[in-house]
Image (spheres, rainbow, N blue to C red):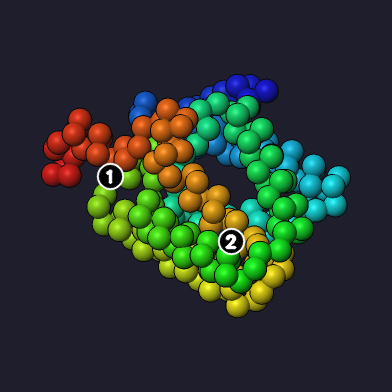
Amino acid sequence: MKKFIINNCMNYIKKYNDYDEGKLKEIEYGLTSIYLTSYKLIIICVISLLLGIFKEVLIFMILFNIIRATAFGLHATKSWICLVSSTIIFIGIPILCKNLNINIYLKTIICVLNIIFIFKNSPADTHKRPIVNKKRRFIYKTISTITVIIFSFIAIVIGNNFMSNCLIFSSILENCLISPYVYKLFKLPYNNYIKFLKEHPDFLNN
């Protein structure tokens, strides 16, 4: 199904546009990402509706993707791994957030650690999309850190409830996905921009 849809879209684009090979690969990558994301979201939404936790899942996904948008992090190497892991994470964590009570002292420690690690490790790129520009990396790091600081402040102020837990666990999840140790665990390259610049020493001069 995926190949059928992507191939038909690409044939249509090639028919009415005169793009070079590089541009076509970029478009195909984007279409594939949209397809996989849509497919994954449909399955997660259906399961959450059946379990009666659609609102909770939606809230957690929005909060997580706010951080993910600038901190980035690893991606699954295969689409089925992404589907299974995303379903477990985005269904399991909201359920945990609904039923978990964290005392203020532990919550404060977790929030401080979240801020430290997001500042230390973000943004984390991938070998397919290295974040080469130094200024852009600084901006992403700054926004990610400020976001987690805001999340942490709100989580502590509003006390023990679902939203507080979501703010904390969205930060924890993102910290896991940008951790060099998690990259190493899954045997994925880390700090890919360094390797890219070594292989393309004239890139920044262009």
In the image, 83 versus 161, the foreground residue is: 161
In the image, 103 versus 90, the foreground residue is: 103
Query: What amino acid is found at the position of numbered circle 1 in the picture?
Result: Val
Residue 44, by quadrant, is top right
**Mark 2 → mark 1, Cα distance in angstroms:** 30 Å
Residue positioned 68% across, 36% down in the render: 39
Residue 164, by quadrant, is bottom right
Residue 203 vs residue 91: left or right?
Answer: left
What residue would you read off at disc 2? 168
Q: Does the residue at mark 2 contact the one at mark 1 (Cβ under 8 Å)? A: no
Q: Quadrant of the N terminus?
A: top right
Residue positioned 64% across, 60% down in the render: 166
Q: Earlier in the sequence, mark 2 or mark 1?
A: 1
Instruction: Please provide percent x and percent y for residue 204.
Output: 17, 44
Instruction: Please provide percent x and percent y for residue 78.
Output: 55, 26
In the image, 110 versus 9, the foreground residue is: 110
Q: Quadrant of the C terminus?
A: top left
SS at badge 1 = loop
Query: What amino acid is found at the position of numbered circle 2 in the picture?
Result: Ile
Does the rendering let one see residue 104? yes
115 over 40 or under it: above or below: below
Does the rendering let one see residue 35? no
89 over 166 or under it: above or below: above
What residue would you read off at disc 1? 132
Identify the disc placed on residue 150: none
Residue positioned 58% across, 65% down in the render: 106
Residue positioned 85% across, 52% down in the render: 52
Instruction: Please provide percent x and percent y for residue 157.
Output: 60, 78
- Residues packed near mark 2 inside 10 Å, few (<14), some (14 to 19) or many (20 plus): many
